[in-house]
Image: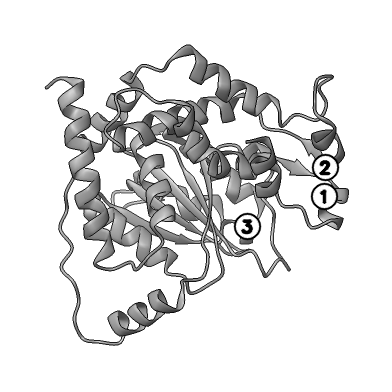
Amino acid sequence: MSDVTAIQNLVEKHKALKQEIGKVIVGQDTVIEQILLSIYTGGHSLLIGVPGLAKTLMVNTIAKTLGINFKRIQFTPDLMPSDILGSEILDQSRNFKFVKGPIFSNIILADEINRTPPKTQAALLEAMQERAVTIAGNHYKLELPYFVLATQNPIEQEGTYPLPEAQLDRFMFSIELKYPSIEEEIQVVKLTTSDNKPEINALFSGEEIVAVQHLIRRIPVPDNVVEYAVKLVNSTRSNLENASDYIKQYVDWGAGPRASQNLILGAKAHAAIQGKFSPDIEDVRAIAVGILRHRIIKNYKAEAEGISEEDIICKLL
């Protein structure tokens, strides 16, 4: 199959996928699209939203429609690295046997990742970056596709362990879940208080998702689009001589090179689901907020004046 035909097939599959997810999840189109874009590119996502916005249900539904395994890990202050990676135990024959932890799945929902100590957060890092884990000196490869979706509750910050910048940078997208509109909430209440359970069909397989990830990487990108993405990321850095007064005034640290890579990968995927065979600047702009939001560290002046990371990115765009 040629790449042109593969992209046309992806457009159809993507539409069908969103309809299938829509049987269970009402609204949240942007959130679902960004999660799917990160899956198509092999990235990870950080989901930020208050409790009760169906984060777990959303990830579970997406995993079902993609036909891949899903596991949820509830992060708590007493969670140890071995609780998520697995551990060696003595079997009846007095031999050591490795028992795999929940990290061995295709989609991992790391629920409230900032509630667990850095030691356990770091255990997830190798899995996210290398698609492999090292336990008791043995190296175990994780099954592809592999995707981590971590959630954070933005309101209760007592007793939490904020993710360090290096770890935040591993997430391709930072996605904000907002409250549904009144019409959407009425639909949610009707849907969830009846006895009807919609049937969810799997439209992909693990192999097909890996094939899509390779297809996205093969999409050509014009030089001017790469230049635009790199210049956009560069413009977030306040410590450079050519930084604008606005950035110097409100930003402590800007985004690193991984942001430029993710902008281009995200733009390729965004173009592909629109049926385009090459991304343009508009595709970069469409995904810029989700990719840059968690990579910009604003200063106390921005905090005091109520300026959000989103405001800063919109100003740069």
Marks 1/3 in contact by CB < 8 Å: the verdict is no
Three-letter amino acid code at disc 2?
Tyr
Q: Judging from the image, what secondary structure is the residue with disc 3 in?
A: helix
- Residue corresponding to mark 2: 250
- Residue corresponding to mark 3: 114
Residue drawn at the location 38% of the way across and 54% of the way down: 32
What colour-coding does the image apply?
one colour
Distance from Cα at disc 1 to Cα at disc 2: 5 Å
Residue 297 x %, y %: 75, 42
Q: Judging from the image, what secondary structure is the residue with disc 1 in?
A: helix
Residue 230 x %, y %: 60, 21
Disc 1 or disc 3, which is closer to the eye? 1
Marks 3/2 in contact by CB < 8 Å: the verdict is no
Residue 102 x %, y %: 39, 53
Q: Judging from the image, what secondary structure is the residue with disc 2 in?
A: helix
Q: Which mark is on residue 302?
A: 1
